[in-house]
């Protein structure tokens, strides 16, 4: 399993766009070829519900999402999440291993994403659970 991840230019630009302009809050990446290069599948400003709907039922994905929430003190906060989406319907094997390797590599590269998680079901990505992780 390789620890290197390759991002096509569009993926690099989408992550930069997310960080610098704040016009979008979500980038969903998929593996484009057997070599494992990542391409953008979704680049958008999604609500939590739209984020869950954007995740495919039977295929893994990598998601960088900026979660907006209020702290216990009422202050507005934003935390960037890195999510490895591994639905149980995707099975195992090389595809899952490739995404896990890409996730590990992105985790090391994305300094702004302090919250890292793996999810197999959408209930694991419930808004309150994500806030608790980020809070």
Image (cartoon, rainbow, N blue to C red):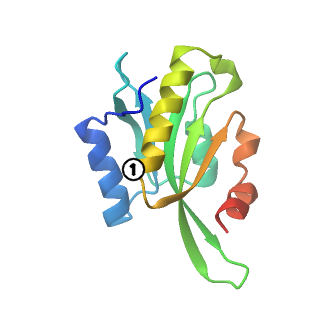
- Residue at image position (71%, 39%) is 122
Q: Is residue 93 above or below residue 24?
A: above
In front of the other: 95 or 56: 95
Q: Residues within 10 Å of mark 1 (few under 14, many from 20)?
A: few
Question: Picture quarter containing residue 78?
Answer: bottom right
Which quarter shows the C terminus? bottom right
Q: Is residue 23 above or below residue 60?
A: below
Describe residue 96's horizontal placement relative to residue 124 as left or right: left
Please say whether residue 27 is visible from this viewpoint. Answer: no
Residue 105, how many percent across, how many down?
43, 40
Residue 7, how many percent across, how many down?
31, 36
Is label 1 in a helix, a strand or a loop? helix
Residue 13, how many percent across, how many down?
27, 48
- Residue at image position (31%, 56%) is 17
Describe residue 62's horizontal placement relative to residue 125 as left or right: left
Residue 132, how many percent across, how many down?
73, 63
Label 1: which residue?
A: 109
- Residue at image position (30%, 55%) is 16
Q: Residue furthest left?
A: 9
Describe residue 47's horizontal placement relative to residue 101 as left or right: right
- Residue at image position (51%, 43%) is 63
Please say whether residue 26 is visible from this viewpoint. Answer: yes
The number of numbered discs placed on residues in the rendered structure image is 1
């Amino acid at each position: 399993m390789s620890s290197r991840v390759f991002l096509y230019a569009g993926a690099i630009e989408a992550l930069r766009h997310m960080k610098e302009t704040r016009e979008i809050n979500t980038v969903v990446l998929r593996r484009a070829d057997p070599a494992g290069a990542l391409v953008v599948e979704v680049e958008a400003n999604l609500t939590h519900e739209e984020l869950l709907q954007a995740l495919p039922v039977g295929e893994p994905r990598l998601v960088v999402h900026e979660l907006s929430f209020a702290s216990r003190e009422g202050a507005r906060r934003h935390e960037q999440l890195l999510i490895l989406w591994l639905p149980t319907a995707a099975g195992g094997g090389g595809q899952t291993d490739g995404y896990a390797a890409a996730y590990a590599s992105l985790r090391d590269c994305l300094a702004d994403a302090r919250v890292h998680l793996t999810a197999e079901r959408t209930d694991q990505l419930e808004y309150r659970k994500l806030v608790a992780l980020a809070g």
